[in-house]
Amino acid sequence: MFEPSVISVIPPIVVLALAVLLRRPILALVIGALVGLALINPLEVLAKFSETSLKVMADETIGWLILVCGSFGALIALLVRTGGALAFGRNALKLAKGRKSSLLMTYLLGVVIFIDDYLNALTVGETMRRVTDKFKISREMLAYVVDSTAAPICVLVPLSTWAVFFGGLLVDNGVAEQGQGINTYIQAIPYMLYAWVAVLMVPLVIIGIIPLIGGMKKAEAAVERGQPALEQIDFEQVQTPDEYAAKAIEQEFEEADEQGKLYNFLVPITLLVAFTVYFDIDVWKGLLATLAVTVPFYLLQRLMTLAQMLEQMIDGFKCMLPAIGTVIAAFIFKDVCDQLMLPRFVIDSLSPYMSAQLLPAMVFLSMAILAFATGSSWGIFAVTIPIVMPLAVAVDANIPMVIGALLSASSFGSQACFYSDSTVLAAQGSGCNLISHAVTQLPYALIAAVIAFAGFLVMA
């Protein structure tokens, strides 16, 4: 048995350093696992890695995550390809009569399309930018509204790809009992302070209660003077932690049916919510039932042949491979950290200095910095939860609040990082220069982060 010591922290340090340098969380996690196994026994690294990876793949939680994440991707691909997602946006445009109403409609669209931040960012941006251009609204402002209702909304809704991913991690790390990952996630939603603040700030900025500041003020003034909108970003030149998935869903939008019908979006989404609630918040059963109805529903309309639909669903499944790969690599890394007795070392080292009241705020602050630096919201959560949660139990902290702090940090990183997938897709969908979008929205993200940090200090 490996004795807990300072050597136990070497693999996490390696992973975090590589995640910052390479912006490849899967590669960083695999290398970290190999480093950890080398510390245990350098002569059996490959044999132990093989044994550990097979053990992880036999885990029921991993199988559930692969099926659910992949099926979400399949459903999203159908919603996009049939034009239902775009039709939803087009119909909402009828309510946009001016500058503020068009931005508020953009905000409401972002709130409604909660199933996935990729789908959210591209759908809302693609459908609203023509209207906001008409009312002389800068692309930077549009991108800010889109980005602020992408990851933050998906974090707050327990029927999203984010909830599925993080719920699975909570089960695997012993934070939630088998089959109770989503329920544990729901308990933490009130404490996801950054996401709440980020979402609530948007209408205040639109109405003018929170004034335009910094680059956003300059961008709006430029559009008012009649200067042309910024060129669309060169998507091929952008490197993100999940560029494979980002490019794939962008291609889906390019091939979408521009004459799609609104009910082809509303019916599947309504079914997903209804079936999931009916099956006691079992997302997998809800997805199965939704797909079982949606496929024949689309076939009856002759939108695609069965072969085309299955091909589309397979492509959608593949869009989720970065998320699936991240969680598999994270589980392998977590198993290696357990062998190194890392949780016990962290608990023994920090428990005397960390109070239950201070922990949520410190978790949010440190994880927000890491998520911003790496651009990998899901990867950072996967790396840190095996370390943070045992410490939270040891100091008797409020567990839902600590989970909320971790999710708050993840949503901050997704929105604030200049090269995160959510930031890139919000800029892409809005037709805004990537750096211009990132710089103009950063002050608002930082304001929300400061409020969230203060909130954790007060609530604890």
Image (cartoon, helix red, strand yellow):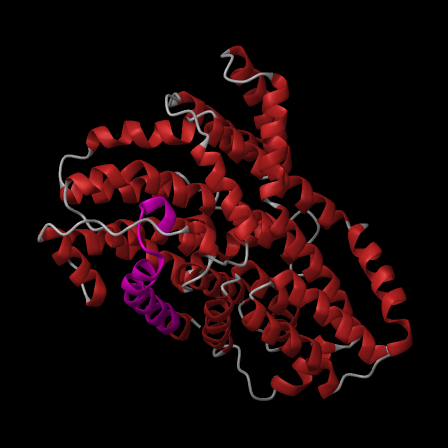
Indicate the position of residue 133 as horizontal and vertical percent values. Answer: 20, 42
Indicate the position of residue 428 as horizontal and vertical percent values. Answer: 38, 48
Q: Please report the residue visible at 25 percent of the width from the left and 50 percent of the height from the top.
A: 139
Q: Please report the residue visible at 21 percent of the width from the left and 28 percent of the height from the top.
A: 94
In front of the other: 224 or 271:
224
In this picture, residue 50 sits left or right of residue 189: right
User: Looking at the magenta stretch, what is its main secondary structure?
Assistant: helix
In front of the other: 348 or 6:
6
Q: Please report the residue visible at 71 percent of the width from the left and 82 percent of the height from the top.
A: 345
In the figure, 209 relative to 308: above or below? below
Indicate the position of residue 38 as horizontal and vertical percent values. Answer: 82, 77
In the figure, 135 relative to 266: above or below? below
Stretch of the chain drawn in magenta: 427-455
Name the quarter where the C terminus is drawn: bottom left
In this picture, residue 442 sits left or right of residue 164: left
Q: Is residue 429 magenta?
A: yes
Residue 279 visible, this orientation: no
Indicate the position of residue 393 as horizontal and vertical percent values. Answer: 63, 72
